[in-house]
Amino acid sequence: MPSIQNYNNHPVVEAPLLELRHLQVEFPTRKGLLRALDDVSFSIGRGETLGVVGESGAGKSLTGAAIIGLLEPPGRISSGEILLEGRRIDSLPTDAMRSLRGKEIAAIFQDPLTSLNPLFSIGRQLTDTIQTHLPLTYTQARQRAIDLLARTGIPAPELRIEHYPHQFSGGMRQRVVIALALAAEPKLIVADEPTTALDVSIQAQIILLLKQVSRDFGTSIMLITHDMGVIAETADRVAVMYAGRVAEIGPVDAMIHRPKHPYTKGLMASIPSIRAHRERLAQIEGAMPRLGAIPKGCAFNPRCSESFSRCQLERPELQPAGESQAACWALSQ
């Protein structure tokens, strides 16, 4: 976590921008409550990019949706807290959360068309958003919109501002969405699979753009993805999720080269290497458990080669593991 110097020249730990404390999200069903997020805790520092990875169904996108207040009913936060700059936001009224969203927290989704209205020009959508959150005249808001389009790599922004979403390519639409996310100078951007629908060359451009956004605007980013290549290029720290919990969290270099949790080790081993020749890619046997059938003890134990009796009986909590923290009983052996 970043630190600052106080007047006695001693390092002081800076308070995180975002904190999740023991967050639980549940879905009521006819068969009872399904717990989709179970005791999720982590923080994001100011200007930091936290990558959140894991297989489909791990709870990555659900965590992002809980932060920005867009959980799909009947899903609800059943316990825990979400704090932005020390202020609790998970219990805000709908109108207050809507005001917060866009101004202090913005979102970038996998499909940019879900964030853009096909009936309005890009310029109208940008200027409306800017004027909703910032005290600017229409002329000032329009100039800011043009500047944002230019900053995010849209060529000829003075002309393109009049165009509609269908007149942009997929990569350019995602740049427009990033400009839209930056419109009100948010403190945090939740980016949910922002490069998945794009080809490799465009992915690289969007990754570079996100890095520039964090550096130039001081914006914190929660980057949700299943692509470890994107994480390696972009993130400062990584949280690995499994079955609705954080399995391991730590600095990106340590997580890639020195993972501690068996699940993280499996994810890293499955990444193709240009240096080593393999007949087959490594894989983790089995599949993510369904919400209604999460095993007792450590949820990963049926797929884990390091599992022993305690793993099947007791659920591990995050504990220090070198440079990281990991929820694994094998570390205390």
Image (cartoon, helix red, strand yellow):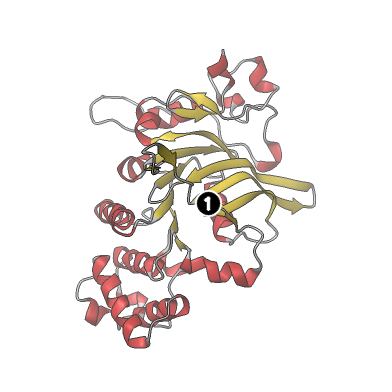
Q: Quadrant of the C terminus?
A: top right
Q: Nearer the viewer, residue 215 or 235?
A: 215
Element on which disc 1 rests:
helix
Q: Could you say which quadrant of the image residue 291 lies in?
A: top right
Looking at the image, is 242 positioned above or below residue 284? Answer: below
Residue at 44% from the left image edge and 23% from the top image edge: 322
Whole-percent x, y for residue 220 in the image: 41, 53
Q: Quadrant of the N terminus?
A: top left
- Specify the farthest residue to the left: 156
Residue at 37% from the left image edge and 36% from the top image edge: 252
Looking at the image, is 265 positioned above or below residue 193? Answer: above
Whole-percent x, y for residue 147 in the image: 26, 73
Residue at 71% from the left image edge and 46% from the top image edge: 34
Whole-percent x, y for residue 249 in the image: 48, 35
Q: How many numbered circles does the render carry?
A: 1
Q: Amino acid at mark 1?
A: Ser
Categorize mark 1 by other alpha carbons within 10 Å: few (<14), some (14-19), many (20+): many
Residue 244 seen by the camera: no
Whole-percent x, y for residue 226 in the image: 43, 44
Q: Could you say which quadrant of the image residue 247 lies in?
A: top right
Q: Does residue 205 appear left or right of residue 242 in this picture?
A: left
- Specify the farthest residue to the front: 8
In this figure, which residue is indicated by the disc labeled 1? 61
- Specify the farthest residue to the bottom: 138
Residue 81 seen by the camera: yes
Q: Does residue 156 appear left or right of residue 293 in this picture?
A: left
